[in-house]
Image (cartoon, grey):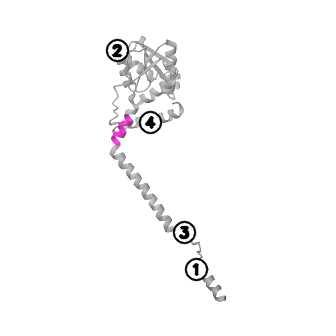
């Protein structure tokens, strides 16, 4: 009996598996982390190579997206948006002389800090509106063709709202909006947002042809690189806020 019991105990010990309670091998964790890092680095390398190879087509598409162009048609009002007076003013004068509309609307930008102090001291510092007016008059646009607002605007959305107010007061049914190419997408979305509900009013976006911006190589020129980056940032912010 004793011998049989001893053998059974020996067999029982042989079959029993004792769990491994020792510490986890740190080398295994290091290998996993190292493999993960390698995959991440490889992913960045692949992305960089794709961008480096396809950067021109991608950046060209980005540039083209910002530009919204409609064929100009005879309308009631030309709107020359504030900013970039020379390039926008030249196209505005061309549109007027070509008979696309009998009136031109100019908004007034919010005066810069310190402008009130200059006026109080008797100094006449020209605003952008004054410079644009001088330019248009010099290009042959008569004074009676200009509608100039004394209400200042602090941004594109306020300017579009002011244009809608003028359109409603005058009973206009069609407008041509002239702006810079990189600015035209945001301007188009803003005017559609402001004029929502007035589908009978036709809005045509006409970027100036006097800008040197070209979607095919904008990233090679410092000023346009800044413009494109800024416009995409504003588009994102406006999309979250308005669109």
Residue positioned 47% across, 28% down in the render = 189
Q: Position of residue 13 (x, y in %)?
A: 60, 80
Q: Judging from the image, what secondary structure is the residue with disc 2 in?
A: helix
Task: Check disc 1 and report the residue beneath it.
Answer: 14
Q: Judging from the image, what secondary structure is the residue with disc 1 in?
A: helix
Q: Is residue 225 above or below residue 190?
A: below
Between 205 and 12, the one nearer to me in the picture: 12
Q: Is residue 14 above or below residue 54?
A: below
* Span colored in magenta: 55-63
Residue mark closest to the camera, 2 vs 4: 4
Residue mark closest to the camera, 3 vs 1: 1
Mark earlier in primary sequence (3, 2)? 3
**Distance of label 3 from label 2 (alpha carbons):** 83 Å
Quadrant in the rendering for residue 180 = top left
Task: Check disc 4 and report the residue beneath it.
Answer: 232
Mark earlier in primary sequence (1, 2)? 1
Mark earlier in primary sequence (4, 3)? 3
Instruction: Give the quarter of the figure containing the N terminus.
Output: bottom right
- Structural crowding at the residue carrying mark 2, measured as other residues with C-alpha within 10 Å and reported as few (<14), some (14–19) or many (≥20): some
């Amino acid at each position: 009996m004793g011998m049989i019991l001893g053998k059974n105990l020996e067999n029982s010990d042989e079959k029993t598996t004792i769990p491994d309670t020792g510490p986890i091998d740190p080398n295994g964790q290091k290998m996993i982390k190292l493999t993960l890092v390698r995959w991440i680095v490889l992913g960045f390398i692949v992305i960089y190579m794709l961008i480096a190879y396809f950067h021109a087509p991608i950046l060209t598409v980005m540039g083209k997206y910002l530009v919204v162009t409609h064929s100009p048609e005879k309308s009631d009002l030309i709107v020359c948006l504030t900013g970039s007076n020379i390039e926008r003013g030249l196209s505005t004068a061309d549109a007027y002389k070509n008979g696309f509309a009998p009136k031109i609307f100019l908004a007034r930008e919010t005066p810069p800090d310190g402008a009130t102090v200059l006026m109080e001291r008797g100094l006449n510092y020209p605003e952008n509106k004054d410079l644009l007016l001088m330019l248009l008059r010099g290009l042959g646009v008569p004074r009676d063709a200009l509608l100039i607002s004394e209400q200042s605007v602090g941004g594109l959305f306020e300017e579009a709202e002011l244009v809608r107010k003028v359109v409603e007061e005058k009973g206009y049914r069609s407008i041509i909006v002239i702006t810079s190419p990189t600015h035209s997408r945001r301007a188009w979305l803003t005017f559609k947002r402001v004029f929502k509900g007035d589908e009978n009013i036709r809005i045509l976006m006409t970027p100036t042809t006097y800008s040197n911006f070209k979607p095919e190589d904008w990233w090679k020129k410092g000023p346009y690189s800044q413009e494109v980056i800024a416009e995409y940032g504003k588009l994102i912010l406006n999309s979250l806020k308005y669109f």
